[in-house]
Amino acid sequence: MSARSLVRSPVSCSAVNECFTYNSRRSRSFYECSNNMKLQRPQVAQMLLPRKLRKSTRLQTSLFTQRQIVSNCCSDLSTTYTEELPNYLAINVLQDQSDVKQENIRKVLVILNPYSGFRSSREVFYKKVQSTLKLSGFAMEVVETAYAGHAKELASTVDFSTCPDGIICVGGDGVVNEVLNGLLGRDDLKEALQLPIGIVPAGSDNSLVWTVLGIRDPVSAATALAKGGFTPIDVFAVKWIQAGVTHFGLTASYCGFVADVIQLSEKFRLQLGPFRYVIAGLLKFLSLPQYRFEVDYLPLSPERNPKPKSPNENFHDHLSDGSKVKRSTHMDGNTGDNWVTRKGEFLGILVCNHFCKPAQGLLSPAVAPKAQHDDGSLDLILVHGSGRLRLFCFFVAYQFCWHLLLPFVEYVKVKEVKIRPVGSTHSGCGVDGELLQAEGQPEWHCSLLPAQGRLLGRHPRN
């Protein structure tokens, strides 16, 4: 037979289809062979196919050999191509359902604040988070808060046997702060310190989870929770000396202009949601008062970092039944450490536990860029002076992370801070977005409890 007759002979469609399709009558083991075994190339070289068709056949075969076959794929070979699971779901996050046994189920309590942010926390949790956590082996009891302080009550009375793997907060930094204070006010303090706190950002301010864990959206939060792991974090205590009341925080404490904005923003919470801080800030900027304080701080020695104490030693000076304090506040035992005093006008006083990046906005600048959540120290920022021009310059410089270069800004790492308002200065103190009200001329004492908090999840870099 001549070569011309061979080229012109028609090619059977069934023969071509046999090269590309999967024969359902053959056993699955014929295709699911070991990793070191290569799929044999179809015997198309013996057939005189057009050049383009031969090239397409070799391409499809090479693509198939590079693909990793999913264990639960269907019998159609083309479905194996399209239904391959993403790596972050198939490997890192979602466990195989056959591996999720009864003893591997993680029992948690979910505290959901339905009024956080734009009141979208219900939709965020039930549509974006719940299914991922269930597939990852979480057994969840969901409780919605009904009033301010409800999350604190739940955390202070919950039976740990019903949620031995932690408490997940759905909302902003406020609900996390309530849960923290509820846990640290319990009688079984040792068990409470071991219970981790998970965060699903759905509030007005989610600085904590964004700064410490690098999580900015609920889907990423669900992924981090499913992966597991813990992140230790320092806890700071703010004590009202005259009343003997102690409040705990994880992010920052502040006095002056920011505390006034927090107080004014509560009037617009229901109407404006997260935008209430912008409106309150503009109104307070237009009617800016003068703030006078006396500030005493104990600097952190550069050559020596504070050594963490045991949980009982750290909390003896801060905790008691309810919110009272058993003993006097812990002071540094080294006589060589000297307190530094600053008096005068201050636009703001900020005590930061980490570098405090706001989750909202494009630039997301850090308030205290040298701070770390587990460095065993607090970062004190003093904005000296008064007046709208100076305050405006500070906020503009802050947007570009230049605020620490201003001559009227003082930045220092400290162990403890004492703040006393003078005259008619607003006496409130803000902690993690919540305002602590005080009467008369209070004295606020901020001190650190190193590595006494635990957050569920790890930073992606870790």
Image (cartoon, rainbow, N blue to C red):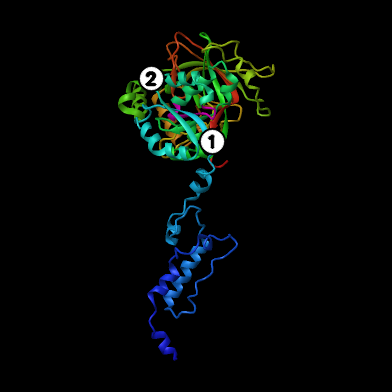
Q: In this view of the protein, can residue 217 be seen by the observer?
A: no
Task: Tell me, yes or no, whether the highlighted magenta stretch contains residue 164.
Answer: yes
Kindly report which numbered mark, 2 or 1, lies closer to the viewer in this rendering: 1
Amino acid type shown at disc 1: Gln
Residue 163's disc is none
Lower sequence index among marks 2 and 1: 1
Q: Is residue 105 above or below residue 296?
A: below
Please state which of residues 200 and 369 is positioned toward the viewer in this rendering. Answer: 200
Please state which of residues 345 and 274 is positioned toward the viewer in this rendering. Answer: 274
Residue 147's disc is 2
Q: Quadrant of the N terminus?
A: bottom left
Secondary structure under badge 1? helix
The reply to whether dot 2 and dot 1 touch (C-beta < 8 Å) is no
Q: Is residue 34 above or below residue 431?
A: below
State the image coordinates of residue 389 (x, y, percent, origin top left). Answer: 40, 27
State the image coordinates of residue 285 (x, y, percent, origin top left). Answer: 36, 24
Q: Quadrant of the C terminus?
A: top right
State the image coordinates of residue 419 (x, y, percent, origin top left). Answer: 52, 16
Task: Tell me, yes or no, whether the highlighted magenta stretch contains residue 144.
Answer: no
Amino acid type shown at disc 2: Tyr
Magenta segment boundaries in residue numbering: 163-173
Q: In this view of the protein, can residue 305 be seen by the observer?
A: yes
